[in-house]
Every structure is written in structure tokens, then in C-alpha cells.
Image: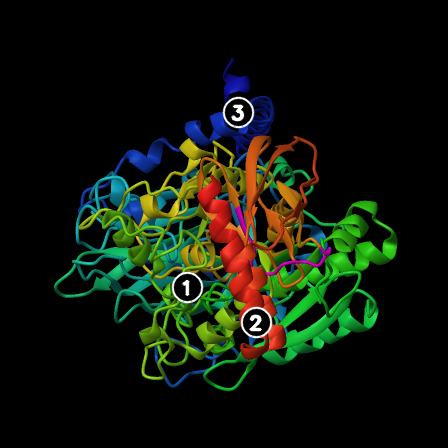
Amino acid sequence: MMRARDSWTSPLGLALWVLTLTLMGEVTQGRTLEDQDYYIQEILNRDHYYAFPEPEEEAATEQPREEAEEFGRPEEKRQPPKLKPTKKELKPKKAKKEKLILETPPGKNGNRKSEKTRSHDRFSNGDYESQIVSEDIRENCPPLGLETLKITDFQLHASTVKRYGLGAHRGRLNIQAGINENDFYDGAWCAGRNDLHQWIEVDARRLTKFTGVITQGRNSLWLSDWVTSYKVMVSNDSHTWITVKNGSGDMIFEGNSEKEIPVLNELPVPVVARYIRINPRSWFDNGSICLRLEILGCPLPDPNNYYHRRNEMTTTDDLDFKHHNYKEMRQLMKIVNEMCPNITRIYNIGKSHQGLKLYAVEISDNPGEHEVGEPEFRYIAGAHGNEVLGRELMLLLMQFLCQEYRAGNTRIIRLIEDTRIHLLPSANPDGYEKAYEVGSELGGWSLGRWTHDGIDINNNFPDLNTLLWEAEDRRNFPRKVPNHHIPIPEWFLSENATVALETRAIIAWMEKIPFVLGGNLQGGELVVAYPYDMVRSLWKTQEQTPTPDDHVFRWLAYSYASTHRLMTDARRRVCHTEDFQKEDGTVNGASWHTVAGSLNDFSYLHTNCFELSIYVGCDKYPHESDLPEEWENNRESLIVFMEQVHRGIKGIVRDSHGKGIPNAIISVEGVNHDIRTANDGDYWRLLNPGEYVVTARAEGFTSSTKNCAVGYDMGATRCDFTISKTNLARIKEIMEKFGKQPISRPVRRLKLRARQRRQRR
């Protein structure tokens, strides 16, 4: 027994004993992690997140300086990376590009970087290995996805929180607070205490090369809270942390000087790890520790990472996935036109305040003219210049339609041959150029939203709702104010009116072309909003305010939302404060927030066009790397929504000689909203499936009524009308043809005969 004991207490025996226990632990832990579901692993590994340390327990949340320095530097024989001095002491220059790679031993985090990227010079510190890998050029890593919601709430943790609505899950770049800033939807993560031991942490769930941090203050109407400086720490197991260094000391990064403008800080050396933590060191004097953030990083390849492969989205479409400035947008339009000259046409509808032309692309089998019986459809994007995703989706859509037409896609060929499609990618090019200058993550929530002269195009149209509703309340309807094609007030047409040039150009475009259906693409949410956008009741900011065509609008909104990859997903996290799942990703605009003079309401009351607002993504200006996924999210929806223009009834209103009658009124029994025919007498009336009593009438003509049935199959029901002139109209026509004097006797004779007929009755 003594010999056996002596053998185990010898150095060699002790080493063998430790090695045996280590291998047994690795095998056991590896088998357990493989068998468990990923989310169960998350719950098991997160106990320490809720053990919030008191101020004196700093060692539990922040690594001691001596240990951190030893962990972050190589052996004595190897020199630490040298960073050139900068103008600002806190921000070193990036002349010498290096990357710090942290490795976790097997059993701690099963992800390892491949051998070919490792340095041959290594050093050990406990169970960890680190090495420096030099790089000549810093890789431009994209955001991890806090703003786009790729990073889930389960991946965000914090030391303490002030309340649930200010939890770590609210610490996302550009997240917006609710109007009441209540316990559920506030505008940042806010620590429960204002001290140096607070932190917010992001779990990338895989080894990631972190390159930078973007921060904002708290979004609030009433409070001013932001962090003015902070440290950055990284880890592979969320227990042992390394602080990012500036030479031999911890690096303090400059934070924000106000609450809305994002501030980017690049790490002096890219760091590879799984977890990253922000530790505020100072904050606004009169405020609290509150921040929103985004992390820049490149996930490292790992085919064994099930979570990543499960959520990976790719596209097979060969399109130009990038952000295009004004010049590049024109060049891309020209390329599409040259590829498909027989079905495309480029034209402009006017100019912006800065003189940039508002270019549109027409896609049709006979571009350049309105074909009788063919409906007109439009997409408008970029009314808010910083909502860039819609603009890029329009550029991708025109490429896709051209390519698929050339490839013989029967669905696309039928759509193009039966529809005249208009795409206006940038209604506010001046605003876009402002947002483009700072890039996808640094523009904040509003830079570039307005035109150059500070006007919000989306709400810059005449308020025709008030004119209609006041007339109805005074019972002057429909004698003085019709229920459709309400004229624009004179004050709006004056030169002194606060109306953007871009707005006037869009109105002229809408009046020139008889659009039937349209969608304006916006950003910052995932929902389709339908009119009315303005509440009818005074002193209310939210109220369900339906149009007479509410059922049609609901279907149109649902047709887009239901075919979008995320809008109707009940598991999806809300973008900011509103949960639209109760209406399947759709909402009545006025019940969301009231807007006077919206594009949707104006289009409905002044023209035949049914217009909806389509909010295509939580992130207004997504990173270029996110465009393929956003295209996949919206591609089918964009096509399905265009196909809805062929829903309802269509036809031509002719006179007794077979000539089309312009401006003839089409009324549907039970629907208090009419439409009018185009210059050639053709019309399109959007309706849901059912039986309808339809009447056609025109000034100087008799009316005609028919029963028209709308089926469930795609394609409008043909419903033509022939109406004849009234006697009074015939008299006027004769007078215009021959003049007053020569036909005074025939006119008297006709009037006498008409009087005699009335007397006989």
C-alpha cells in the first residue's frame, strides 16, 4: 500500500492522475453537450448571469489587472504588439494590423480555429492558449445583427437592469421606445446601479473575430442617458475575461456625447472570441448608465455549428447585392435597360430640391404607352431617404424581372405582358445621399429622412380626409364633395405652400398615369399598413379608421405579409414596441398612429389607385451583407402584391358609337367609393370575390347597371358598359356643331316635343 501511495504522490504519478481525470471530464462533458438540445445548454450555462455581484465583488465580474495582462500578452521572450500613437490618446492608429485569437480548450467550448490560421508561437495560461496573428489589412466585418434581430434576446445579458423594459434585450442599436416608455418597451438597456461594475454582454454563439463597437444613448422623449466611456472585454466561456489593451493598460473607449448619434470605436487589434462585454466607465452627469449598441464582427467558419447552419440564408439569384449611390443607381438602370430593351424604359418624373432627377423604370411588353385593358402598377421607395432597404429592393426587382423574362419564366412573362409596371427606387435622392455618406450603421434613426429643405414627403400631400368628412357631417355629400377624385385645395397649389418639389412631381405622375394599385416601401418595421392613415375623431392619436374598401385593403395587405418570410411568423420578436401578429402582420394606419396628408390617403381619395405602406425591415439601412437575405425575405411578396392588380372587375365604358368615354364613374352598390375611367374609357376596380351590382355613368350620358361576379381565380372579371347620350347632351352637341342662329328653330321644336311628352305622362 505504501508503494502504491508513493507512486501516486510522485511527480510522474500525479501528472498521470491529472491527465486521466481531465480526459474523463472531456469525454463526459462532450457526450452531454452533444445529447442536449441547444437551448437546454443555454439555460444550464447561464446561471452565473443572474448572480449579480455587489460592488465589492469586482473580481467576480471583472478580471484582476495582473491576471488579465498575463492572459492577454505572450511570454517574456516575445514582444507585445506595438501600436502607433494617435492624435487622441484613447484611439490608436491602425497602421499595424494584428489579430488576437483566444482559444478555449475542449470541453469548454467545442469550437476551435483551424490550424492553418494559428501562429507557430504559442503560450499557455491555465487552460487557455493565445497567439498573435499579423494581418496587413483589417477585414471589414459586418454587424452581428443586434439591430436586425439576428442576435436573439437570449444572446444578450447584463449585470443588472433597472426594470424589464430596460433589460439587455432592449440594448439594440436604433431601438425605439414606446410613447409611454412603459415597463415593456423602453429605449435602451439601463443598469440597475450607477457604478463601475455594470456591463452588457453579447454571446455570438460561435467564435467570432470582433473588430468594433457602435454605441448610442437611450431613446427617450423625457430623459437624457448615455455612456461617455467604456471598456471592452472578451471571453470564450463568459467566466474568464480579457480587457482590450492599449499597449500595457486597459483601453478606455470614448462613448457618446448625446443620445441619438451612433459612435463607432474600432478595436486596435481584432479579437477572436465567443463573448464580448461592454463595461461603462463614465456616463452623463445628470443621467444613468444606459446604452444601445451594435457589435462588428466576422463569424469564423464552423461547419459543426448547428445553430449557424440552421439559421443560414442564401440566395441563388445572380443580382447586384450592394448599396448604390445616385450615380451607381443610374448606371444599374441603364444596364437593365440594355439587357431588356424591349420591355424596359427609363424616364424621370421631375427633380429633387438639389436638382437630382427622380428616375423611374417602366417594365411592360409595350413600354412607353398605356394599353387599353392593361392595368398600371407602381412601387415607390425612398420617400424617407434613410430607409434604404426599399430602394435596393426596387433595384434588385428590376434586375430579377429582366433576367427571369429572358430566361423564359412563364409567371414573370405573363405578369409583364399583362401589366404595366413602374418602379421609382428613390423618391428622395437628396436625403439618401446624406445617409449614404455616413454608411449603414452610423446614420442613426433619422439622418436623411427628410428632403434637403426639411420636408417629410410621406406626409406632405393634401389633407383630403378632412374635406370629405366635414362635407359628410354637414350632409353636403356628394353634391359639393364627391367620394372620389376629390380636387386638390387651391392653397396647396400656390407657390408659397410648404410643399416639396419631390411631392409635386409625384402628384403630377399620379395624375398622368391611371394607376390601379401601388405600394410605397418604407423601413424600420415589419408590417403592411393600409388606409386610412388619419383618425376621424378629433383629439385622438390612435383609432381604427377604415375606408369603404376596408375588406379589399385588408386582403391586399395580407397578400404581402403572408408571403413574406417573417411578417406573419408568430415566433418573431417585435422590432421596437408594436406586436402586429394579432392582425397577421398588417395594421390600419390610423390605429397605429395618425398621419394627416399621407400618400396612401391622398392616392385613395384623389385618384383610382389603392396605395399601401409596406415596411420591409426592422433595420432601415441594413449592412450590404444582409441584402441577399432581405431579398429572399421580400422577393415572393413583391411579386404576389403586383399580381393583385388583376383582382376585381375590368372593362371599357363606350358610347353608342363604340368610342371609349373618359372620366366615366364606376359605382359599386354598397361601397361608398367610386372610381373613374381612363382617357380611353377603360377601368379597373379592385374587389374581393363575390357578386356585385355595378353602375356606369358619365356627364351627358344615361347610366347603365350590371351584375358582375368576381371569382377566386387570379384574373379580373370583364364587365363592359355601353351608355348613350341624354337629349340635353344631344342638343348641346347640335348647338356646338351648327352654331346658335341657324338651329334656333330646330332647338325650339325639340324642346316643344320634350314638353309634350312630359304632359302626356
At which x and y percent is residue 411? 78, 45
At mark 3, the secondary structure is helix
Q: Which residue is mark 3?
A: 8
Three-letter amino acid code at disc 2?
Met
| Left or right of residue 15: residue 656 | right
At which x and y percent is residue 217? 28, 61
Q: Nearer the viewer, mark 1 or mark 2?
A: 2
Residue most extreme to the top: 1
Three-letter amino acid code at disc 1?
Asn
Residue appearing at x 39%, y 66% in the figure: 461
Q: Which residue is mark 1?
A: 458
How far apart in space, not on screen, are marks 1 and 2 (Cα)? 48 Å
- Few, some or many C-alpha atoms within 10 Å of disc 1 (few <14, some 14-19, many ≥20)? many
Residue 157 sits above or below residue 299 on the image: above
Three-letter amino acid code at disc 3?
Trp
How far apart in space, not on screen, are marks 3 and 1 (Cα)? 80 Å
In this view of the protein, which residue sits in the foreground, 620 or 684? 684
Residue 151 sits above or below residue 568 on the image: below
Residue 735 numbered mark, or none: 2
At mark 1, the secondary structure is helix
User: Dividing the picture into quarters, in which one does residue 322 lie?
Assistant: bottom right
Q: Main secondary structure of the magenta part?
A: loop
* Magenta span: 657-666
Residue 639 appears anywhere in the view: yes
Residue appearing at x 37%, y 81% in the figure: 453
